[in-house]
Amino acid sequence: MRRFFPLVGRWLLPLALAIWLPGLAQASSTADHSKFESLKGPFTSAPEVTKACLACHTEASHQVMKSIHWTWDFTNPDTGKRLGKPRTMNSFCGSPLSNEPRCTSCHAGYGWTDARQQPEPVQENVDCLVCHDRSGGYKKVATDAGHPLYEPRMMGGKSVMPPDLAKAAQSVADPGRDNCGACHFNGGGGDGVKHGDLDTSLVKPSRKLDVHMAADGANMTCATCHTFNDHIPSGSRYDTTAKDPHGLDLPKDDHNRATCESCHGDTPHQQAKLNDHTDRVACQTCHIPEFARGGVATKTLWDWSTAGRKDADGKAVFIKDDHGHLSYSAEKGDFQYGENVRPAYYWYNGVTEQVNIGDKIDDSTILRLNTLHGDAKDPKARIWPFKEMRGKQPYDPELKTLVVNHVFGQDDSAFWGNYDYAKSIKFGMDYAGLPWSGKVGFIETRMTWPITHMVAPKEDALKCGQCHTRGEDGRLAQLPGFYMPGRDSIRWLDILGYLALGGALAGVLLHGLARIVMNRKTRHD
Amino acid sequence: MIKRDVMIYTRYERFWHWSQAVLIFTLFFTGLGIHGTHSLLKFGQAVTIHTTAAYALMALWVFTTFWNFTTGQWRQYLFKKGIIKVIRFYAWGILVGEPHPYKKSLQRKQNALQSLAYMTFMVIIGPALWVTGIAYLFYNEWAGAPWSGDALWGVAVLHTLAAFAMGTFVIIHIYMTTTGKTPLHYVRTMITGYDKVELSEVEEAYLAETKSVEMR
Ligand code: HEM
């Protein structure tokens, strides 16, 4: 249809989107929460606010308690494996177990102090404000198991004031980018650390950084794509939709808008040859040429093996690089960062195998913490871009498992403060109820993070020749299993071909030379 | 026997020849670009030009096949005896001034070697290129098949092989055009359409009377 009605594609669709999308992003409400008596406060604690919310929104807490934001528990339908933060390992901080009040500061609830058990199903402990506060003032404090401050507290040498809970309660509306970002931009302990395509630059991104969320563009929020159905989010790194054959979501909605195809379909280009790619190449591969483009660096290496260094005076060592990033921390080890990072590319069908705490690992090579499934022969797989995180982390060289490291707490075992792996790991493993041989080794790890945010304007997309090239720096130079014109050739064929061409050329030149030398005219006429 | 300037290549034949030449040059050049032999073009540009030229060439071939059959000119390409003599001539005779073993006539515009070469071009190299080229172009229509990965490799190998054959053919073909009375004689003939051909008196009278073929 595009071929016959180019105008429909070129003008009408963007126009329709421009009108429709901002509407989606800021749907107006029929209720003004600042007019509700019950939200005027004063509130002495955040659960009191939740109680007020639930008086009208009777089902909300039950819905949230079923979501991964609350449970941190997910069974992968493809592998059958039980996943979730309390058991699945990454190459960053390690395990939340024994470190709860710090790590559960990003739990969508209050007071989860023991992640060995599911959070208690107390209705008021659901945190409505972290997602719905639009006053900008509400903030979970980093160390209080999900609570905000209730009294002023000295932090980093400054007195920090508690948020105005009544103001926050009256401001509630659909979540903005900053709400989701409060946790998701700061995973791994800081801005942009984990994902590489999620950091605070996306609160107010330029079009160049993110065409969808650009404040002066479509101004979409996270939930515009990550559709929530009864407070259950769509789009997952544990269970990825690597290819969405459902395509356009209207008129037949699959209630999951977290794929590009949901809005763009699977033939979005004017040029047929480009559409020919969408079955094997994820949109993100061309349209996110680099990640961490917003001026916030992402962590690319975390080496725990060097942690714990002290200087001559017995003081813990912290070193900053030229950009002001910690390049060494006695608490955490060596770091490397990257901005405008070129992704690594792999075949991916959406199935990922994660390493859990307690899983037997193979320590004879680099350990892949999440193994991607899919290859060129798998019709469900597409070529996807990833952030490749390099890690080196403590493990048990005898029992061959990763270990729980107790880093946070006011006790004499916590690594942050005591710098003693033997103590901190013993504490962590005991707490988790897992066997430990008493030995500590360090294993090199890799972790791949699918890149899907920071979609660039189309003029910045990859050009054909960045993959279709013989060059060793071609984007797909390392990706095996298929023939790609421009990259691949067959040696014997090329040799044969160039010999034939060269031979013919040499032959006719010699023949011509012979004719000139013999210098006789043929009598042919 | 009289020698006369006779239109041996009609307007369509010359149009076909030169447009085919331009298209094949374009296809070979852009094809080698796609292949990675040179990087004088961006990959995307090379593909766009290659695809457009391929469509044009295939359309031209459809018309020309039609023309060949309706005019009966296809008979020119049939196998002729005496090919060894022609090969011997080009390998040796031409160097020592022997006469060409073949005389051009209106019914026999090509010598035996030419017929064989053009026939190879038309029934092997050409079809190999368009058959594999179309398969290549419409890869996506069959990409779902489990064997498609290996088949794409096969298609690319055959297409590239045929392209090299085509390139080799073109080099030799161009050189052969210099073997006429003067180096540019054959080229001029293919531009103007006229060449000196021996006619019997009856033939000459017939052509003069009927004007079925133009004479100067
Ligand atoms: C007759 C119709 C033809 C068609 C339909 C055709 C089509 C194609 C297609 C679709 C490609 C792959 C481009 C891509 O990556 O998307 C290609 C590549 C190529 N073509 Fe053609 N082509 C034709 C004729 C020719 C001719 C006449 C030549 C040379 C004289 C030629 C030489 C090449 C070469 C060398 C490649 C690169 C192959 C590789 O490295 O895989 N083609 N062609």
Image (cartoon, coloured by chain):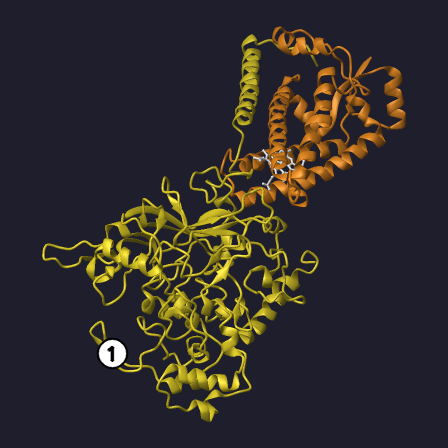
Chain colours: A yellow, B orange
Residue A215 screen position, x and y as percent: 46, 71
Crowding around mark 1 (Cα neighbors within 10 Å: few <14, some 14 to 19, many 20+) is few
Which residue is depicted at the point 32% across and 68% down?
A102
Q: Quadrant of the C terminus of chain B?
A: top right
Residue beneath label 1, please?
A153
Q: Report the front residue among A1 and A418.
A: A418
Residue B19 screen position, x and y as percent: 68, 35
Residue B77 relative to residue A515: left or right: right
Residue type at the position of mark 1? Arg
**Number of residue marks:** 1
Which residue is depicted at the point 27% across and 56% down?
A426
Q: Assign ligand 1 to one image quadrant.
A: top right
Rendered view: A114 above or below B75? below
Rendered view: A20 above or below B141? below
Residue A356 relative to residue B31: left or right: left
Q: Report the front residue among A123 and A465.
A: A123
